[in-house]
Amino acid sequence: MKKNLAVILASLLLLAGCSAKTKEEPKVETPKTENAPSAVEPEVEPEPEPEKEEEAEAEAEAEAKAEVEAEPETEPEAEEEIVAIESFEGAYAEKGYEEITSYMLAEIEGDTIHIYMYSETDESSILYWTGSFEQPEGRAEYSFDSVNNKEESDFALFASKDETKTFTIKGGDISFSGSMLGMTKTFHLVQVTP
């Protein structure tokens, strides 16, 4: 507590020293009359010596640094345990789909994935990707390259023409990067129905 008061006091002294430099008291002149005593000039505070000002500033900084060093360190948050999913079967949607009107939808059946661009506005879907899907087989985190099913994607106007697409699995999250019109985005899919 004493250190806090010392820091506050040192700061106030510094501020007072600064304000004495920047703010001058206006001189008030009173008209002189023959019988009136002469006006008393107001006292002007002497400017603080630069050495003392620097000492006070250094002392305040040292005390503030000591307070920061004395604060206890916070423990880092424990990482969330990632649980392996037995099988990715069912319908998936882009994370946050409840708040947007156009998003990615996916259907996974066995070793096949179909991803569609979906628009709630006109309730339409367009094929974006169709390819192989690697089930987890007890793994919680893994990546794999899905091979494009050219028999389906070659006839879809907006389907990706990439030979492969890398998918990353982390627990129940499926992520992949997609590019369209020169823009690339990482999509995260979450299960909506098994």
Image: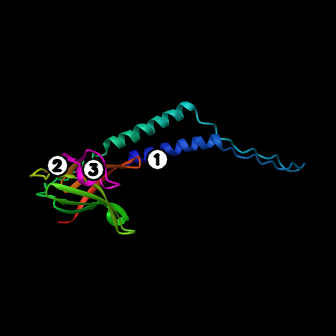
Q: Quadrant of residue 68?
A: top left
Q: Nearer the viewer, residue 1 or 186?
A: 186
Q: Earlier in the sequence, mark 1 or mark 3?
A: 1
The mark lying in front, picked from 1 and 3, is 3
Residue lying at 31% horizontally and 56% vertically, measured from the top left:
156
Q: Amino acid at mark 3?
A: Phe
Q: Nearer the viewer, residue 61 or 33?
A: 61
Q: Is residue 3 above or below residue 104?
A: above
The answer to whether one can see residue 12 in this image is yes
Q: Is residue 154 above or below residue 68?
A: below
The answer to whether one can see residue 79 in this image is no
Q: Which labelled disc corresponds to residue 141?
A: 2
Q: Amino acid at mark 1?
A: Ile
Q: Is residue 157 magenta?
A: yes
Real-space Cα separation, disc 1 to disc 3, in angstroms = 54 Å
Q: Position of residue 104 (x, y in %)?
A: 31, 59
Q: Which labelled disc corresponds to residue 176?
A: 3
Q: Which residues are magenta?
A: 140-166
Q: Which labelled disc corresponds to residue 8?
A: 1
> Badge 3: how crowded within 10 Å, few (<14), some, or many (20+)?
some
156 left or right, relative to 193? right
| SS under mark 2 | strand
The mark lying in front, picked from 1 and 2, is 2
Q: Position of residue 187 (x, y in %)?
A: 30, 53
